[in-house]
Image (cartoon, coloured by chain):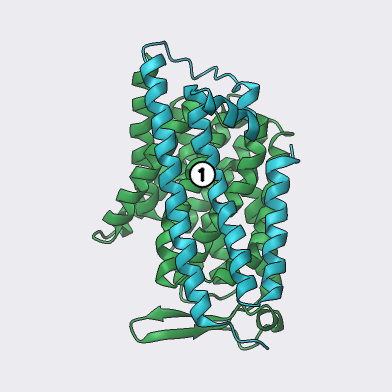
Chain colours: A green, B cyan
Amino acid sequence: MTILTFTLLLWLVSALTGFLGALTGLGGGVLLVPVLTLLFGVDIHYAIGATVVSVIATSSGAAAAYVKEGFTNIRIGMFLEIATTVGAVLGALLLTRVSTGFVGIVFGLMLLFSAYASWQSPPDVPPLAKPDKLSLSLKLNGTYPTPQGEQPYQVYRVTTGFGLMALAGALSGLLGIGSGAMKVLAMDQGMRIPFKVSTTTSNFMIGVTAAATAGIYLKRGYIVPGLAMPVMLGVLMGSMLGARALMKMHTRILRIVFSVIIGVMALEMIYNAMTGRI
Amino acid sequence: MQVPNRWTDYKLEQIIGNLLRAGVVLSALVVLAGGMMYLIQHGSEAADYRTFHEPAAQLRSIAGTVGEAIKLHSDGIMQLGLLLLILTPIARVVFSALGFSMEGDRMYVGITLVVLAVLVFSLTAAK
């Protein structure tokens, strides 16, 4: 196979991955690494390097729109980014010091978690009775647009959320993914932030978290331009088309089918890692 | 307690949105240009991605990447585009710090500068 054929193939598969990632709400990153390693046989470090830049591209592109619509809470994002970036730096430093088998197993477990999270419909979270003093002094409470006008909301359990974000950041740094599923979980289940605000603010934070990771990957030589080029351009295009298609489609059945496929990929990844093939 | 100023928050949101979009478009165009060059020059060579080799030492630092891009090496141009992409969220953090300081929100200027410090550490010292 020539470089031209291989590059076009990578671009096409990345576009499809980005499309499905946007459609299912899983994001491109968590799917891209297994596709690159299992399907194309790319070394997991280079797969993770190409993924992290794709994650920055898609999340920044989407965040540009969400921020302007007023759903994103910049203060919540900024405050929690302390946790995610510190976590990401530690995770990325850890990646350079552990075996690829270990990374493969953690990745497989993360895939299983994503499959589980995408299986579930977003539950309604009732507000807690006890307000959080920290959310007042940090000015985290805000409003978001609804058909009935601007709706105010309170933020709870700030320390729990902060801790979970540090963990999400560390997984981001170790695996090169956005950990969107875990960030949303920390915000809507943990901090009781409205779902729409949680998802858009999570997406807002992913770019900065991934940038904290990418700086270290670049210096370690995990970002290979010839590989990252078609992957990043493909995922970016695919996810833009996916976000557009999402508005016209019912994705419930697609999400269920998809979480089964991801579950299978997760098991294959864990099996390969345990038998030393990653 | 100080109530956040909606108008300036709104303005900051618009600026950040435009900045993120511009960064993604610019970096994608640079990566695409480098990619075209790369495929024209090396497209017919045999692909060997299973035993991917590490990128050249120059492409593992900011200064080296810029140097390779100035020499119009396709690898350097692609890597410069990827570097611009990495810098986009960092530029967003810088603008947030400026925005919060214009709103007179010193606590959030501080929080933003902590995040910026972590990002700069990651891009320069951490390895």
In the image, residue B100 lies at what x, y percent? 62, 71
Front residue (pair A39, A223): A223
The residue lying at 70 percent from left, 79 percent from top is: A134
Instruction: Find numbered disc 1 in the image and state the secondary structure of the residue it sits on.
Output: helix
For the question of whether residue B61 can be seen, the reply is no
The chain containing the residue under callout 1 comes to: B
For the question of whether residue A238 can be seen, the reply is yes
Q: Quadrant of residue A275?
A: top right
Q: Quadrant of residue B5?
A: bottom right
Residue corresponding to mark 1: B85
Q: Residues within 10 Å of mark 1 (few under 14, many from 20)?
A: many
The residue lying at 59 percent from left, 27 percent from top is: B67
In the image, residue A173 lies at what x, y percent? 64, 45
The residue lying at 42 percent from left, 56 percent from top is: A62
Count of picture labels: 1
Image quadrant in which the C terminus of chain A is located: top right
Front residue (pair A140, A121): A140
Q: Residue furthest top?
A: B45
Q: Residue furthest left?
A: A248
In the image, residue B21 lies at what x, y percent? 42, 54
From the viewer's perspective, tell me whether residue A114 is left or right of residue A222: left
Q: Is residue A241 placed above or below B1 in the rendered structure?
A: above
Image quadrant in which the N terminus of chain A is located: top left
Q: Quadrant of residue A229?
A: top left
From the viewer's perspective, tell me whether residue A239 is left or right of residue A218: left
Q: Is residue A100 placed above or below B115 in the rendered structure?
A: above
In the image, residue A228 lies at what x, y percent? 48, 32
Front residue (pair A204, B74): B74
Residue type, label 1: Leu
